[in-house]
């Protein structure tokens, strides 16, 4: 009886091993369009943002203000930048802005001098005249907007950004 039990156990283990080996050699084809630009997002900034197809033709789908979408790729269609948010569905940069996640603590100082306040901008990178922050202050940031000019802007509060040229210290933390 003991020999039969051991033999049965050995056969079961060998059978499982060959099943695992067969499963590990399976190859799956992946559609290349499903690969996204890691960490790129678009946030809708207009009240209703219509989506467009790859030719720039408006579809009957619209996205809500402040909704966030992962971007698969960025394309220029008829001279306008579009963000692909689903297969053959593109969001116009006129109705949204692109950003990346970038979590860190920053210390700011005005480029105009340590005694001057630091300018604050909205997501369109228009300076807010009624808001500024103190030079030498530290802020948590989670978002980076990159534009056609080479200077990134970092979010410090909802729809409030500082220019990277005003950042004098950065500290990151990582988890493994």
Image (cartoon, grey):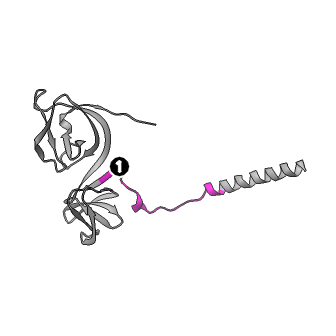
The answer to whether residue 31 is left or right of residue 95 is right
- The relative height of residue 88 versus residue 134 in the rendered view (above or below) is below
Tell me where residue 52 appears, x and y as whole percent. Answer: 26, 68
Count the labels in the image.
Answer: 1
Give coordinates of residue 136: x percent, y percent: 19, 28
Residue 170, quarter of the rendered image: top left
Please give the residue where the numbered disc 1 appears in the rendered image. 39
What kind of element bears circle 1? loop
Residue appearing at x 21%, y 56% in the figure = 45
Q: Quadrant of residue 118?
A: top left
* Magenta-colored span: 22-41
Task: Sort mark 1 into few (<14), some (14-19) or many (20+) by Cα contacts within 10 Å.
Answer: few
* 111 or 30, nearer to the observer: 111
Percent x, y for residue 148? 19, 50
In the rendered image, the residue lying farthest to the right is 1
Q: Position of residue 126 (x, y in %)?
A: 13, 47
Of the pair 61 and 64, the residue shown nearer to us: 64
Magenta span main SS = loop
Q: Quadrant of residue 157?
A: top left
Please give the name of the residue rendered at 44% of the width and 63% of the height, measured from the top-left corner.
31
Q: Name the side, left or right, on which 39 lies relative to 15.
A: left
Q: Residue at x 14, y 32 (%)?
A: 110
**Magenta stretch: residue 5 in it?**
no
Residue 129, relative to residue 169: is it above or below? below
Q: Is residue 75 above or below residue 157?
A: below
Is residue 127 found left or right of 108 in the rendered image?
Answer: left
């Amino acid at each position: 009886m003991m020999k039969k039990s051991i033999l049965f156990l050995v056969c079961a283990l060998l059978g499982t091993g060959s099943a695992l080996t067969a499963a590990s050699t399976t190859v799956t084809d992946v559609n290349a369009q499903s690969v996204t630009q890691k960490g790129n997002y678009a946030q809708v900034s207009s009240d209703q943002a219509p989506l467009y197809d790859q030719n720039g033709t408006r579809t009957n789908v619209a996205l809500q203000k402040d909704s966030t979408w992962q971007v698969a790729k960025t394309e220029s269609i008829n001279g306008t930048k579009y963000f692909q948010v689903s297969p053959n569905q593109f969001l116009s940069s006129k109705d949204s802005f692109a950003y990346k996640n970038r979590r860190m603590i920053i210390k700011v100082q005005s480029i105009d001098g340590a005694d001057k306040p630091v300018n604050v901008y909205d997501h369109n990178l228009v300076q807010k005249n009624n808001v500024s922050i103190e030079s030498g202050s530290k802020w948590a940031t989670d978002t980076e907007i990159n534009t056609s000019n080479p200077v990134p802007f970092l979010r410090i509060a909802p729809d409030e950004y500082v220019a990277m040229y005003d950042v004098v210290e950065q500290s990151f933390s990582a988890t493994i």
